[in-house]
């Protein structure tokens, strides 16, 4: 973790908290590893707190206040930043995603949230929450669509997604919703805003049979890997673990169809859904 790069505390409240943590650490003449050791966290984890990549948890804030004698500064601000529009298991990953420079993701079952249309997201949330009131569903949809604002920048972050063929074939929301959803992904590809590859059924066994993986890279912090399960998620910063998942993603990309062939398949399947919707 490069320790001398200046931080911009005005970029976000978390960046402000991280900049103060770095200031206090340097004043105390501690390395990132020395500060993290009593907390059983790595030097890179401390670096991610300082850069605002990771969210500061209350137990860490209390330790920093005690170590640096900051009269509750870290805990007060940590509690103020705690609220999130995302589920607890995904909140930290969503915050990291928002400042990532590169996002690479393997999606085994669903179109990734960043690439979903409103209709597709609605079908997904109704399936997840069949008894939820409509207002709650609308809040979830709004939060998901807000994440997609990341793609309004013409080049950043770089987004590269490998979709399992199952994502294309499962008719989430019905033919009309799927036609719109796949066409939306194809348009983003044609605009050269994202890279998409499809991993075909014909490949058989592959390196990520156990589930989805998302990799995020940053300008001023080590990369992260996010693993998501049913109502759960794990954000990894251990270099060996991240490197292992990076290799998994590379193997998937090598097994998947080329971007050009993948785009043709996306558009072909979208057209099939259009025809299915038009059938009497």
Image: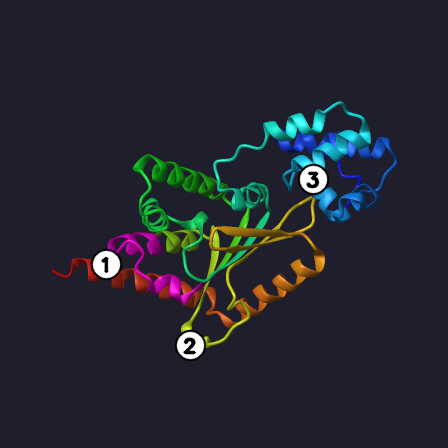
Q: What's the magenta region?
A: 162-183
Disc 3 is placed on an element classified as helix
Q: Is residue 255 above or below residue 138?
A: below
Residue at image mark 2: 202
Residue 270 in view, yes or no: yes
Residue at image mark 1: 274
Give me the C-alpha separation between circle 1 and circle 2: 25 Å
Q: Residues within 10 Å of mark 3 (few under 14, many from 20)?
A: many
- Image point (65%, 38%), residue name: 57
Residue 155 in view, yes or no: no
Left or right, 277 with reference to 80: left
- Residue 119: image location, x then y, percent: 31, 47
In the depicted view, which residue is nearer to us: 142 or 190? 142
In the depicted view, which residue is nearer to us: 107 or 127? 127
Q: Nearer the viewer, mark 3 or mark 1?
A: 3
Is residue 223 covered in magenta? no
Disc 1 is placed on an element classified as helix
Question: Which of the two discs, 3 and 2, labels the residue nearer the N terminus?
Answer: 3
Q: Residues within 10 Å of mark 2 (few under 14, many from 20)?
A: few
- Name which quarter of the figure residue 54 lies in: top right
């Amino acid at each position: 973790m490069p320790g001398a790069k200046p931080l911009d505390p005005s970029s976000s409240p978390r960046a402000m908290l991280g900049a103060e943590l770095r200031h206090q650490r340097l004043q105390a003449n501690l390395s990132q590893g020395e500060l993290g050791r009593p907390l059983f966290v790595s030097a890179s984890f401390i670096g991610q707190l300082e850069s605002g990549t990771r969210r500061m948890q209350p137990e860490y804030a209390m330790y920093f206040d005690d170590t640096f004698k900051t009269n509750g500064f870290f805990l007060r601000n940590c509690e103020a930043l705690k609220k999130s529009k995302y589920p607890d298991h995904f909140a930290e990953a969503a915050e990291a995603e928002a400042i990532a420079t590169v996002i690479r993701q393997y999606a085994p079952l669903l179109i990734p949230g960043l690439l979903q249309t409103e209709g597709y997201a609605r079908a997904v949330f109704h399936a997840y929450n069949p008894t939820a009131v409509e207002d709650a569903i609308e809040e979830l949809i709004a939060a998901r669509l807000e994440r997609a604002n990341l793609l309004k920048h013409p080049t950043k972050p770089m987004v590269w997604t490998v979709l399992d063929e199952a994502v294309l074939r499962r008719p989430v929301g019905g033919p009309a919703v799927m036609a719109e959803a796949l066409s939306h992904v194809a348009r983003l590809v044609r605009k050269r805003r994202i890279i998409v590859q499809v991993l075909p059924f014909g490949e058989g066994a592959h390196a990520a049979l156990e589930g989805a993986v998302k990799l995020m890279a940053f300008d001023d912090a080590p990369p992260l890997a996010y693993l998501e399960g049913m109502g759960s998620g794990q954000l990894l910063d251990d270099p060996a673990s991240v490197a292992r998942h990076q290799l998994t993603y590379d193997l998937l990309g090598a097994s998947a169809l080329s971007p050009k062939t993948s785009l043709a398949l996306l558009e072909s399947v979208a057209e099939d859904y259009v025809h299915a919707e038009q059938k009497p």
